[in-house]
Image (cartoon, rainbow, N blue to C red):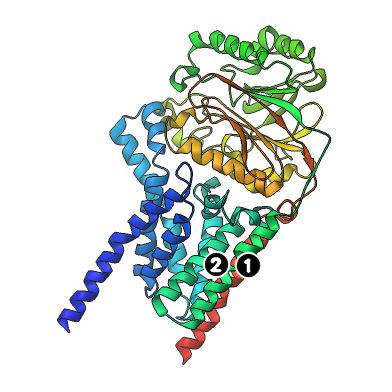
Amino acid sequence: MNQAASGARRRAWLAFAFAPVSGAASVLAFAPFEWRWFAPAALAALFVLAWSARGRRAFALGYGFGLGQFGAGVSWVVVSVDQFGNVGTPLAVVITAAFVALLAVFPALALWLGARAAPGASRVVAFAGAWLLIEWLRGWALTGFPWLSLGYSQVDAGLAGLAPVGGVYLIGLALAFAAAALAGALRERSVVYVTLLLGAALVWPAAHFSARMQWTQPVDGPFRVAAVQGAIAQEQKWLPTQRWKTLALYSRLSRDAGAADLVVWPETAVPAFFESVADEWLRPLAAELAGQGTTLVVGVPYEPGREYFNALVSFAGGGEQVYAKRHLVPFGEYLPFDAWLRPLLTWLEIPMSRFSAGPDEPPLLDVGRYQAAASICYEDAFGRETRAALPQARFLLNASNDAWFGDSLAPHQHLEIARMRSLETGRWMLRATNTGISAVIDADGRVSVRSPQFAEHVLIADLQPRAGATPYVRFGDWPAVLIALVSFLFGRPWRRTHSAQ
């Protein structure tokens, strides 16, 4: 008896040790590694470990998985806090560890909820449904952080065709169901689980069929676009002595774009408030480019009154239209509970950290011949915000600055997320960044052309405007969320019946 108990404890400790390894391995499914099959394999391994777990043990296994996944996958946060937060490396590590510890709660909750289902086939759908529901919740909680959502790992893999139907979360639900069915088949060796696994496999040909559908249609012919990448080091960007050099550089690179119909600068490429440089630099340059048929769009802090905004200004048609960023980054662009925590941000010395959120309106920006669905930085991580500008917008436009994260995984992961937005909406995207990765992405999520990182570059390419609405544009995340909710609830009556018996 003692020997059996000792063996059980040993297996439990091995499971707790392996859960973080499985979580870290899941990161290999995402950019820049792109070993796509690691996503379902790592999740299936977690479900195998937790198959017979209950309560705190299930929570602990999920928490270990989360520590591994986010510890490996968003370790780039330490780069930003250390290099630009004025706190020193030891405290930067502590802050990043606390962030990872918070994120790990989400997979822990998912596993705890899924493990409450009764043993049997209902556990497969309960695990899958709980995983997706908590992942969706992570995209909302504390303003949302959907990084490393499971579906992003399939942006160019077999399930990509589900994106225009139900978005990144429908892909994630399909992967979670396949992983849970595989875990059941491995643990129970029953024909029921093999049947469920075969059923899950049918999603792949369905996704292939969906990928062949023409959900949107071309409008006119392609037009030429340019993304100007100045490669200004983040530690130099806001120095007063750098301001005129930066404006001169971006002006020169914009002229180098030649006969492009649209020239776009990155997020806050202009290191000064709009009105302080508009008459001397921006309006004359925009007029010069307009003379050759080019519309200029610049990323710039915009201060029309007492508030100031992280904005894009388009000089289309001789006028000026402003898009103000609506989804701000906590602690980076604004401070929650400002009255109490303001000394913290003063100590961190983060420049331009008191932005106000733009008006809650569709993010449509007039860029000349067409309207674009505009987003700034990590706004493109939220499909619900991109689709607010559709179907009116003919393409997607994102301006970012990933210089905050140096030579880390973050710029590659961010580009992967942008690709998913193109897939979901059936729209091309022009992406302009400060240090890379600038890109043009086609309506199928493929990168048509991309820039090198950390180099001055003018990316020039043809972009095809498109019209129409994918099912995702019409219905958003709700079909996937409702399917996940029904799947999760399916296990509850089974559990009650099992307990009664």
Q: Is mark 2 on a helix, strand or loop?
A: helix
- In this rendering, the answer to whether 340 lies above or below 188 is above
Image coords of residue 267 (percent x, y): 59, 27
- In this rendering, the answer to whether 12 lies above or below 71 is below
Image coords of residue 230 (percent x, y): 55, 19
- Which is nearer the eye, 198 or 8? 198
> Which residue was labeled with disc 1?
483
Q: In this orientation, does residue 130 appear?
A: no
Say which residue appears at 73% left-offset and 51% top-offset. 473
Position of 462 with respect to 500 (left or right) is right
Question: Label 1 is placed on what type of residue?
Answer: Ile
Q: Dividing the picture into quarters, in which one does residue 341 lie?
A: top left
- In this rendering, the answer to whether 136 lies above or below 268 is below
Q: Gap in Å between the C-alphas at discs 1 and 2? A: 8 Å
Compare marks 1 and 2 and give the one earlier in the sequence: 2
- In this rendering, the answer to whether 337 lies above or below 179 is above
Please tell me the numbered disc located at residue 129.
2
- Contact (CB < 8 A) between labels 1 and 2? yes
Q: Dividing the picture into quarters, in which one does residue 200 lie?
A: bottom right
